[in-house]
Image (cartoon, helix red, strand yellow):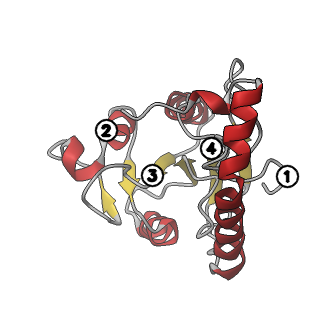
Amino acid sequence: MIRAPEFWYKDNLSSKIQSILFFPFSIMWIIISLLKNILTKKYKSKLKVICIGNLTIGGTGKTPFALYIYKLLKKLGYKPVFLTRGYRGLLKGPIEVKVTHNFKDVGDEALLLNKVGPTIVSKNRSLGAKLIEKHEDNFNVIIMDDGLQNYQLEQDIKFLLIDKNLKFGNEYCIPAGPLREPINQG
């Protein structure tokens, strides 16, 4: 596992100098992110889409929160389904996760989600949503795990999770800081 650079979260002269040295690359990251957002054609699903994401690199509890939302929606009488990119999995999808899949196929998060509810893996989230819309189980809510920086699928509700200890670090974008996108972009 790759560890986050310490200078992202320290407030001293050395950390500030390191962040400044990486800042030109952060500008390139921001421009690419903005272009992806502007140029990507967004699909509006017939179903409601709940997105769970964060602004920083690393874990903030997105998958456990997605599981919580799923269980809550089930109790309220909805028919939710998970949609994930299948991080570190080889299958691009869209494909429904089966018990015969392993982490090399669909990634470990998809396997965890699938233990609780139906899960679709799709690198292209709009194609995943279209597969869900045609599914025989007639789902009515898509829970998109880690989808905040995905611009392919319009989102009706967004949950932004923040690590209460680390917050946004030095508030710079990758590689000068831990942010996937500027705080004011989302």
Q: Tag 2, which secondary structure?
A: helix
Mark 3 or mark 2, which is nearer the start of the sequence?
3
Q: Nearer the viewer, mark 3 or mark 4?
A: 4
Which residue sits at x=46%, y=69%? 124
**Amino acid tagged 1:** Asn
Q: Which residue occupies the foreground of this view, 65 or 6? A: 6
Which circle marks residue 84 in the picture? 3
Choose top left, top right, bottom left or bottom right for residue 90: bottom left
Q: Is residue 169 visible?
A: no
| Residues at marks 4 and 2, CA–CA distance in whole angstroms | 17 Å
Mark 3: amino acid: Thr
Q: Quick one: 30 or 157, which is closer to the camera?
A: 30
- Residue at 32% of width from left, 65% of height from top? 93
Q: Which residue is mark 4?
A: 53
The Cα atoms of the two marked residues, 1 and 4, are separated by 15 Å
Mark sitting earlier along the chain (1/2): 2
Q: Amino acid at mark 4?
A: Gly
Residue bearing the label numbered 1: 184
Q: Which element type, helix, strand or loop, lies under badge 4?
A: strand
Mark carried by residue 108: 2
